[in-house]
Amino acid sequence: MINYTPPFSITNNMLMLVADIAEKTGRMSGYYSFETKPHLRRNNRIRSIHSSLAIEANSLSLDEVRSVIDGRLVIGPEREIQEVKNAYRAYDMLGQFDPYSIRDLQKLHGVMTWMTVRDPGVFRSHDEGVFNGDVCIFMAPPPQYVPDHMRSLFEWLRRAKETVHPLILSSVFHYEFVFIHPFSDGNGRMARLWQTALLSEWNPVFRYLPLESRIYEFQDGYYDAIAACHSNGRSDVFIEFMLDKINMTIGCALEQLSERDAYLTEAVHRLADVMDYDVPYTASQLMQKLNLKSKNNFRKIYLNPALEKGLIIMGIPDKPTSRNQTYIRKL
């Protein structure tokens, strides 16, 4: 397959979405620096991992995924717990490998599937299909063609990066990778990780955006787009689907960050930065994280303004004065 080019067309809708995403990423860099907000980076990473694994039927909840990553005891299937640990290691390597290297892809697959499959990092030697639950969307190419298909795909990727916008390039790769289905397991996880890696080469902000969460939210549409492309013999539908979800992801992040900067005081910013999303904290725990001694000042300057703005909510809203009250970050 010399000089193979995946079949796709660049439509006006794609171009409009690319322009919109590019404009939003530019605005985001003006509002916010993920590099200075480790809590936000970490929370988004956990959301990405939970969503990508949930798409593949991992049953652990977001809180359980967070607990596994934090090293706390979680009662659940051993394989699913290991999948979380593997995914966290793999995502933590973003920026440390070459997304245009097939050898690095195989190494990262080894990280992603360590102790969960028999052949980590090795192309499959048997037939495989793409499934949405129990429904087979299509059968992947026979195993004897996988090495040539993957070499051709990566050769195209290296050629096309000079002429095809990374937003479109990464989406084409995502679909083609899923279509080839090169490994016996972990293909969906690797496709989503690799698109994030390619996007991060264009703009590092994508390392910290939970695109996988948006795919999980629209999981049926994700598989419908894959099936439509298989039927049509080209990846246009999938490209438009992914561009739309990327646009939604960065739009939501930009909206939250711009609103946050507009109406929150520095004290409330500090409070938000020490809280993980969707994790309950007592007032004492938050005061300790902020190194505060005065409970009155904590409530007046930090807690009450955050509650008023909806940045955090009470864990027991019907008993606001309960001694067991907790506070949960939502924005």
Image: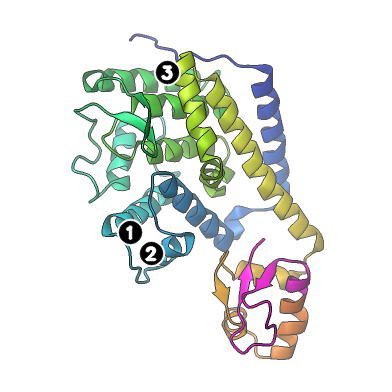
Relative height, residue 148 to residue 199 (above, below): above
C-alpha distance separating marks 2 and 3 = 38 Å
Q: Which mark is residue 81?
A: 1
Q: Secondary structure at mark 1?
A: helix
Which residue lies at the image location 28% right of the left edge and 33% below the top edge? 183
Closer to the observer: label 2 or label 3?
2
Residue 329 magenta-drawn? yes
The percent coordinates of residue 43 (x first, y second) are 53, 59
Under mark 1, the amino acid is Ile
Question: Which mark sits nearer the N-terminus, 2 or 3?
Answer: 2
Which residue lies at the image location 47% right of the left edge and 32% below the top edge? 223
Question: Which mark sits nearer the N-terminus, 1 or 2?
Answer: 2
Q: Which residues are magenta?
A: 305-331
Q: Are marks 2 and 3 in contact (CB under 8 Å)?
A: no
Residue tagged 2: 68
Residue tagged 3: 156
Under mark 2, the amino acid is Val
